[in-house]
Structures are given as structure tokens and as C-alpha cells.
Image (cartoon, rainbow, N blue to C red):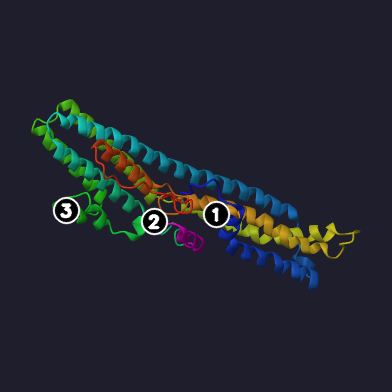
Amino acid sequence: MHAGKKYTFFEFIVWTRRDIYRLTILAIIPTVLYHFCKFTFLSISWVPVALLGTAVSFIISFKNNASYSRLWEARQIYGGIINASRAFGVMVRDYLAAQDKTTDVQIIFYRHFAWLTALRFQLREPRAWENANDPRNIEYARLYHVSEKTDKLEDTLSQYLSADELKYILNKKNKATQLMALQSSHINKLATAGNLSDLQLQSLQNSITSFYDNQGKAERIKNFPYPRHFSSIATIMLNLFVFLVPYGLLNEFNKLGNGTLIEGYSIWLNVPFAILLTWVFNSLDIVGESSTNPFEGSANDVPITNISRTIEIDMRDMLDETDLPPVLIPENSILM
């Protein structure tokens, strides 16, 4: 996610410059034909265009609200994972400390790090409806590094799992699910051996259930896109509005100069004002679209890599380890 103070106006211009080129062409063509070729029939009433613009503004607002809701829910999910992980770590450490099960505590802790790793790799997998391959996003992605797109899952998991568990997990489709299943199996074996009381076992199993709940919520957002019919109608109506605006403003700007020094030339004001108006609507739509998939790895995503690293540092600190992984530093104000 963008961790700086704000996006600058220049950044927005660069980010949307391809759209500005398109909007400029759409504004110049009818203006040139109207002024030089006297195609006055190209002018249409501004009233229906304005009514269409009102409808488009409602649709874009609805889309942006839905996109923000998806983004905020994703952040809440990972906030729940943070809290549950810390509580789980404390319980495992304290419950097993009396049984002198230091090795088991470390295995469970590191398996949890593996679960966080597998989950974030799964959430970064591309989907057909995501926007990571949009030219503007590809260009902006050069400013930061998404480790899940360059690192190998096997190499990362090998830091946390034994050779046997690593081999077992790599053969599973949903690796995060099976890692949490291993946690449950390990904890139940400890309880069977008398190292955990029934109440302690229930508390740890409740934590595992919480992890499964949050994983399922994250997978739902990842695998269920913003409904395509809403997205499609918003795009169609926006494009129609963008196309009609220069035609609806032709007569208005042509009359603007009547009786003044710019009579006959005021028509050219149609170009900058049509560009400005359509750019505002177009940019609002792009902003909403850029937030609708909060796990794809864009600059507006939930920073799941950073959150996972924070959890790992906190839990390894509980083990009194001194060789802690470094805190992830934002690259060009982008935190992943």
C-alpha cells in the first residue's frame, strides 16, 4: 500500500496520461469538425448529457464505496490474524513451558510462519479480473518489489519447515489449509500425551478455528471479484458519457464568445474543459478499480507481506530470539 503522505497531482497525471491522450483526441475531433468543416449537426443538447453524467456519478460512487469496503474488510481480516497470532503464540509458549517442550513450541511457531507465508503467496496469485497487468499498474510496479512474485515458495517455506513437512506440504493444493491442519494434529498429540489440559486444548483449537475463519474470508475476497455486471455497466456508461461530453459542450462554448473579443474562437475552450470534465470522471473510476482487488500486489493493496513479517518478529521475540528478521521498509512510499 502507499505509505506516504499522499499521491501528488503529478503522479496522478503520469498514472492517467494514457487516458488523457484518449480524452484529448475525443475532444479535438468534434471541435475541429464543428469549427472548420461547419458540421454544426454534431452539436447536441447538454441536458441529456448532464443527466447521463448524473447517473454515471451515482454508479461510480457505488463502485468506489464497494471497492473501499472490500479493501477495508481485507485489512480487518489481517488485523484479526495479527491479534490471533499473538494470542496463539503466548498460549503455546506458556502452556508448554511447564512441560519443558521448548522444541515443540519452536516447531509450532515456525509452522505458523509457514502458514502466513503460504497464505500470502496464495493471495498474490493472479486472477483474470485483476488489474495487475494494466499498463499503468505495470509501469508503477517498477517502483517497488513484490516478493511473492519473485521469490520461490519452496525456498521460503524451507526456512520454517522440516524436510519431511516441506515435502508433504508442497504436494498439497491449498498449502495454507494443510499447514494449519498439521498444527491441529500436533496440538492434539500433545494433549493426548498429557502435555495440555482439556481447557488449554480448547483454547488452542479455538485459535486454529480463528485462523481458518480469517483465511476463508481472505480467500473469498480473492476469489470472488467485484460483480462483473456492475463493473461492466459502469464502464459502458462511463465510456458513453466521455464520448458525448465534447459534443454536448460544442454549442455552449460556441455561444460563449458572442459579442466579445473571442467570438468565433471560444469554441476551442471546448477542448480543455471537455478533457478536464471527462478526466475527473475517468480518474474516479480508475481509483475505484485500483482498490477492488486488495491482494493482487498493487500500490493500493493491503500490505500482507509487511504484516506477516511483523507477526513473525513479534512471535520470534516471544521465544527470546536475537536474530530477528529485519522490518520491511517502504520502497518509494510503497509498503507490500
Looking at the image, residue 179 sits to the left or right of residue 45; the answer is left
The residue under label 2 is 146
The residue under label 1 is 286
Instruction: Indicate the secondary structure of the residue bearing disc 3.
Output: helix
Give the magenta-colored segment's residue range.
134-144
Which of 194 and 97 lies nearest the eye of the viewer? 97
| Residue 56 visible at all | yes
Please check the rendered image and state whether residue 51 is part of the magenta-colored stretch, yes or no. Answer: no
Instruction: Indicate the secondary structure of the residue bearing disc 1.
Output: helix
Mark 3, other Cα within 10 Å: few <14 / some 14–19 / many ≥20: few
Instruction: Indicate the secondary structure of the residue bearing disc 2.
Output: loop
Q: Earlier in the sequence, mark 2 or mark 3?
A: 2
Residue sitting at x 36%, y 59%: 149
Q: Residue furthest bottom?
A: 37
Question: In the rendered image of this protein, does residue 61 appear above or below residue 250?
Answer: above
Mark 2 residue type: Val
Percent x, y of residue 129: 43, 57
Q: Earlier in the sequence, mark 1 or mark 3?
A: 3
Alpha carbon separation for disc pair 2 and 3: 26 Å
Q: Earlier in the sequence, mark 1 or mark 2?
A: 2
Mark 1 residue type: Ile
Looking at the image, residue 309 sits to the left or right of residue 278; the answer is left
Looking at the image, residue 156 sits to the left or right of residue 123; the answer is left
Q: Which mark is residue 168?
A: 3
